[in-house]
Image (cartoon, rainbow, N blue to C red):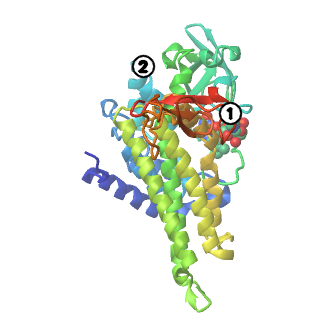
Amino acid sequence: MLGFDLTPEQVDIQRKARDFALREVLPLAWPGDARDELPLSLLRKAFEEGISSAGVPREYGGKGYGLLEMVLMVEEVAAACSGVATSIFDNSLGLTPLVLSRNEPLKQHYLSELAREAKWICFATSEPTMGSDVASLRCRVTEQGGGYVLNGTKYWVTNGGIADYISVFATTDPEKGHEGIGGFLAHLDWDGVTRSAPIPKLGQRASNTTGIHFRDVFVPGKNVLAPPGKGFVLAMKTFTRTRPAIGALAVGAARSAMEFALDYARKRQAFGTALSGFQNTQFRLAEMYQKLETARLLTWKSAWEVDSGMDATTSSAISKMFATEAAWQIVDDAMQIMGGYGYTRMFPMEKLLRDVRLLKIYEGTSEIQRLILAATVLGSYRPVMPSLHDLPVTGIPPPGEDEAGEGVFLWRCRVCGNVHVGREPPESCPYCFFPASAFKKVVPGQR
Ligand SMILES: Cc1cc2nc3c(=O)[nH]c(=O)nc-3n(C[C@H](O)[C@H](O)[C@H](O)COP(=O)(O)OP(=O)(O)OC[C@H]3O[C@@H](n4cnc5c(N)ncnc54)[C@H](O)[C@@H]3O)c2cc1C
């Protein structure tokens, strides 16, 4: 059975997150953006209200929320500010490698702590010279003295300036590609760790993004998330479980953009009528709404697949790609409806436009999602339809015998699809002029 209704518990989770977003996040969204600053008090409150780190499994003392519960919360918080939401839910990105790790003592220690205390864990594959091509990362890790020593720089680390811990990916040898990569849980107050100043950004200014430099940082052997050779797969599995949340960020921000545009369209008068009276505005709103609903459905589906233990690589790429691109279009349309006021800094549309632009870039650009989907379509996808060459022939008399009693057959040109009736294929196709060798005998009913 297929159902889209939420359980009473899920409705409650959604309601609490909405209340938190309107009460706590919305008033601080603009000041945070204007000051290029993450309102730290919000992170703590989000933890206290059970919104961040809620994905820590129950056996480690956490709430054990699934990804569906997570995307419900992300949408609500992102509706108030997707920058703040990025920072609040960055803990889910940081702790997912830990949840997926096979290092049970490490999980016991850190997951229990993350469930108990307001601690922040960030995530880093990206570096100054690479982002999409994770297998080419250069941050080095060398086995030494019962542990590993980290050397190199990570870049674009969300919450890098404020986090306590980091799930960091590094390689024993950049020449080895994905086979050299391991995952490690490091403390950001360990000797040899330096954090950069926050990176100035176009949007999501209320989220913290920094570089982190590791110089001879010793990571004890017990802090290995995945040994060298296994880290790349761990990072990819992490993205599959976190990309639906980026889809939900997009849905939340786009929902607000649509609601603000709707409000404006009802009140603003032009040519003697409200903007909402123009069919152009109505159609625009209709398309915005349709994209929003589709994006939410795809996001929920991919979250549901993850929670059901399915391989959600494809659906998670679809939801991330569709929702983030739809959000960009929805905000652009909303800005158009608001005319000049949409472009000012007095209304939220310009902030929404700057904020949602990032969603098509981080956790795998739209192009990377297309690569994943292209690999699926061209690789594992199994078509239902027969090949073009084997389509049944319609509208042409079935094969039989000609006047001389000789067998007559159907011949399909494999280049242009023309079907010829005769004992033999024609010398050349009358449409595309390819020779007889281009023709294949068609056996009706046979695939
Ligand atoms: C604000 C912010 C926060 C971030 N937070 C984090 C974080 O917490 N942790 C983390 O690890 N990273 C983080 N990132 C990094 C982010 O994931 C990368 O920026 C992203 O993956 C793209 O990598 P890149 O910037 O190096 O671009 P590149 O990989 O250099 O790509 C540049 C362009 O080329 C395209 N391209 C690349 N390869 C291909 C290809 N094979 N085919 C077609 N097109 C291609 C890309 O799609 C893109 O359009 C963050 C980034 C930003 C901006």
The image quadrant that residue 375 belongs to is top right
Question: Is residue 380 rendered to the left or right of residue 434?
Answer: left
Indicate if the residue with disc 1 has its beta carbon within 8 Å of ligand 1: no
Q: Is residue 350 above or below residue 444?
A: below
Q: Residue at x 35, y 58 (%)?
A: 15
In the rendered image, the residue lying farthest to the bottom is 272
For the residue carrying disc 1, how many other residues have a C-alpha within 10 Å: few (<14), some (14-19), or many (20+)?
A: some
Residue 272 in view in this figure: yes
The picture places residue 132, in percent across and down from the top left corner, at 65, 34
Residue found 59% across the figure and 51% down from its top: 38
Number of labelled discs?
2
Quadrant in which the N terminus appears: top left
User: Who is closer to the viewer here, 264 or 205?
Assistant: 264
Amino acid type of the residue tagged 1 in the rendering: Phe
- Please state if 158 lies on the left or on the right of 198 as rendered: left
Q: SS at mark 1?
A: loop
Q: CA distance from mark 1 to mark 2?
A: 60 Å
Classify mark 2: residues with Cα within 10 Å, few (<14), some (14-19) or many (20+): few
* Label 1–label 2 contact, CB within 8 A: no
Q: Nearer the viewer, residue 202 or 316?
A: 316
Residue 235 higher or lower than 104, as above or below: below
Instruction: Judge depth for marks 1 and 2 and give the one in front.
Output: 1
Q: Give, as a three-letter code, the residue at label 2.
A: Arg
Quadrant where the C terminus is found in the figure: top left
Please name the residue that numbered disc 2 is placed on.
102
Q: Secondary structure at mark 2?
A: loop
Q: Quadrant of ligand 1?
A: top right
Residue at image mark 1: 434
- Looking at mark 2, is its residue's CB closer than 8 Å to ligand 1? no
Q: Position of residue 95 (x, y in %)?
A: 47, 33
